[in-house]
Amino acid sequence: MIHLRDINKTYQGAQPLHVLKGINLDIAEGEFVSIMGASGSGKSTLLNILGILDNYDTGEYLLAGNLIKNLSETRAAEYRNRMIGFIFQSFNLIGFKTAVENVELPLYYQGVSRRTRHKLAMEWLDRLGLTQWAEHYPNEMSGGQKQRVAIARALKKLAL
């Protein structure tokens, strides 16, 4: 599913900062992976590249057999929406949408019918113990509850 070969990334500035040096990584579909390292070791840069939020300088990134390099923003957004689930440290929930609406949102952009996306979102909220919080807004939830809503939003793609 994800195949990185010899990925390099340098940030240009007064002094170039070579952050990723020859990264190789293979992640199979359905596999869970942790990326750990010291502060400043390039974890966020690697995740931004994997999430198609940033480009790499050299190497090869294949996502489900598709070369990920210099994509248009439209094409990058399509891949992100269909193939990548994000769980941000700051949750990135939309404050004026309920928990279930936040989980449904990516499915809406995928063209999933209202009934189906609501059913899928509720199933994921139930799996994470949040059924009773489905109609609550982020400012009415604890940090842990918001984190689980963000997890449900990322994992609901597995149900399609």
Image (cartoon, rainbow, N blue to C red):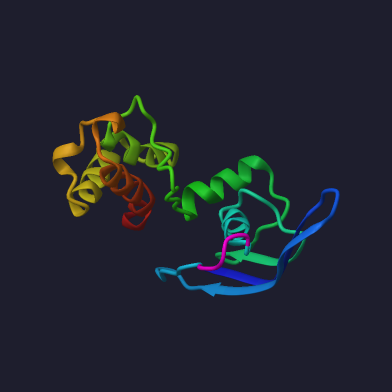
Q: Main secondary structure of the magenta part?
A: loop
Camera-side residue: 19 or 32? 19
Camera-side residue: 67 or 112? 67
Q: Quadrant of residue 145?
A: top left
Q: Is 96 displayed left or right of 64 in the figure?
A: left
Residue appearing at x 16%, y 43% in the figure: 131
Camera-side residue: 152 or 42? 42
| Residue lying farthest to the top in this orientation | 96
Q: Is residue 23 inside the magenta stretch? A: no
**Image location of residue 40, percent across then percent down:** 62, 60
**Image location of residue 49, percent across then percent down:** 62, 56
Residue appearing at x 62%, y 64% in the figure: 41
Question: Which segment did they paint magenta?
Answer: 36-40
Q: Is 103 displayed left or right of 40 in the figure?
A: left
For residue 21, above or below residue 107: below
Q: Quadrant of residue 108?
A: top left
**Image location of residue 100, percent across then percent down:** 26, 37
Residue appearing at x 44%, y 48% in the figure: 89
Residue appearing at x 38%, y 51% in the figure: 154
